[in-house]
Amino acid sequence: MSNSKHILVIRLSAMGDVAMMVPVLRALTEQNPQLKITILTRAFFMPFFRELPNVSIFPAEVKGKHKGILGLFKLSKELKAIGFDAVADLHNVLRSNVLKFSFFGKPVVQIDKGRAEKKALVSGEIFQQLKTTHERYAEVFKTLGFTLDLKNPSFPKPKKLSSKVSEILGNKTTKWIGIAPFAAHESKMYPLDLMKQVINSLSKAYKIILFGGGEKESSILNHFEYEFENVINISGKLTLDEELDIISNLDVMLSMDSGNAHLAAMLGVKVVTIWGVTHPFAGFAPFNQPEDHVLLADKNQFPKIPTSIYGNTYPKGYENAAGSISPKMIVNKIISVL
């Protein structure tokens, strides 16, 4: 058992990686109620942690006053003033390594990202389940001396929706399915013409709520909303807090290997994920979801999968790998999960 009473946790980005911390920190704070946690992350991510006791956010302004070496020096002085006992670096990048040197005298444990075995996975040298990101996060806290068990996790209750959100969505008279059809890379996305078929089938019996970001995505989702009954696009209309409230009320979320899968999973919502050139063996499957909630591209047709960890590199012809999963398979999976 650690003597540390106050831990600084570092994870600046990306959305999915930050969301994956939430179930781990929830278990940590439940199992170590004396512990105080300060998270160094982007201010945008603050709503992710709103349910967690003894957890506060220190916003990193990496494009503002904390930019560059001088900015990091300023940041380290501000952080030292809050008086933490130990550091859990769940990011392990250049910025956090620079900060580490200014925390001399405090225990600092950094995540082992398993770069060598991930490289072996994408090169085809091995094809097996690697440690999950959640397990890697948990190992950092265990190394700092804390008890932490991720089995039998607890989740917050669905949030009461505000009148503004209720006005957009209407009453819940049927099951709600969230669909987040976008990802950072095209190779991780299900082809939109096939996704339209999925939406068309499911919207006949259920309410579909579409998630996305950015003007281009919103415009595509607006077309889907216009074309089908029982489909509502919330992209660009609500705050992150309000979107999380909606996600907590979903019966299932259909997502790519992307941030929305992790947002739903951290709230205890059932998640069905579609995978293109990436693969859950790399350790990024959403938290606490059954293995059969994962829909994988056809490896006979695309034998080099996973072609990369993040979906940013792939051979020619692999950009639509996810399209080898039929719309019928996805619809049947969603109905079986419901």
Image (tube, rainbow, N blue to C red):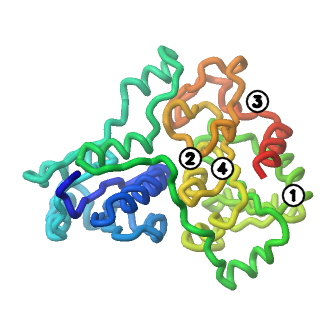
Q: Is residue 93 visible?
A: no
CA distance for labels 4 and 2: 9 Å
CA distance for labels 1 and 2: 27 Å
- At label 3, the amino acid type is Ser
Q: Is residue 306 above or below residue 53?
A: above
Q: Nearer the viewer, residue 183 or 256?
A: 256
Residue beneath label 2, please?
288
Secondary structure at badge 2 equals: loop
Residue beneath label 3, please?
324
Q: Residue visible at 73% across and 79% down?
A: 166
Q: Position of residue 133 (x, y in %)?
A: 44, 41
Q: Earlier along the polypeptide chain: callout 1 or callout 4?
A: 1
CA distance for labels 3 and 4: 20 Å
Tell me whether circle 2 and circle 3 mark residues in contact (CB < 8 Å). Answer: no
Residue beneath label 4, please?
271
Q: Is residue 232 above or below residue 163?
A: above
Q: Can you tell which mark lies on residue 203?
A: 1
Tell me whether circle 1 and circle 2 mark residues in contact (CB < 8 Å). Answer: no
- At label 2, the amino acid type is Asn
Q: Is residue 191 visible?
A: yes
